[in-house]
Image: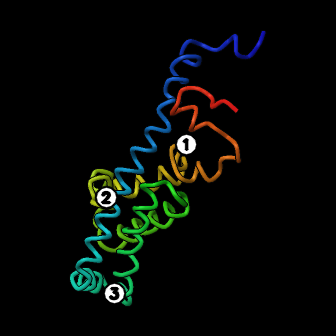
Amino acid sequence: MKPTASKSFYDRVAIAAFDRLRDPSLLFVRVLWGWMFFQTGYGKLGDLTGTTEFFASLGLPVPFVNAVFVGALECGGGLLLLGGLASRPIALLLLGNMVVAYLTAHRDAFGSVRSFVGAEPYPFLLAALLVLAFGPGRWSIDALLRRPAGHEDIAVAVAGSRPQA
């Protein structure tokens, strides 16, 4: 008996349908949270004095340098994440940034699961972790750059048929 013949309805239909949600879901996460990272970074860069004072109150070393670095990382990294360019390296940096946010500004969130997932950095951390774990998906600049020359997948998806040679 062939291995595919023993697959259940769930294996044949439901998983195939759910697999089709992978790329739109990753696009949604990247665009939404890329934009959110951009906005938070832009806010930090727009108020460097306030951000520097906040970082100093947390006891971070060289607070001005850290404020510029974190603001630029969130702002630029958010835009890269949004477009899906250098997605995994950026997601790793943003994930590290969120871990530092938890360890410095949100230490009290480690008291319970409810407080951890309710903390401000949680959705940012989760979005970065999802992109790091699953990649940016096929609908990203990274996927376009990995595509072999002459590959028409995107043209087929847009036009609905293969271009004539």
Residue 32, percent from left and from top: 34, 50
What secondary structure is marked by label 1? loop
Residue 5, percent from left and from top: 70, 10
Q: Nearer the viewer, residue 150 or 40?
A: 150
Residue 69: which quarter of the image? bottom left
Name the residue beneath numbered marker 3.
63
Name the residue beneath numbered marker 2.
36
Are the residues tagged 1 and 3 within 8 Å (C-beta)?
no
Please report whichever mark, 1 or 3, sits nearer to the chain's N-terminal start.
Answer: 3
What secondary structure is marked by label 2? helix
Q: How crowded is mark 3: few (under 14 residues within 10 Å), some or many (20 or more)?
A: many
Residue 79: which quarter of the image? bottom left
Q: Residues within 10 Å of mark 1 (few under 14, many from 20)?
A: some
Name the residue beneath numbered marker 1.
138
Question: Of the residues shown, which amino acid type is indicated by label 2?
Answer: Met
**Residue drawn 55% across the image and 63% down it:** 89
Give the quarter of the figure containing the C terminus. top right
Question: Of the residues shown, which amino acid type is indicated by label 3?
Answer: Pro
* Render colour scheme: rainbow
Residue 48 horizontal side relative to residue 102, left or right: left
Above or below — where is 47 with respect to 153? below
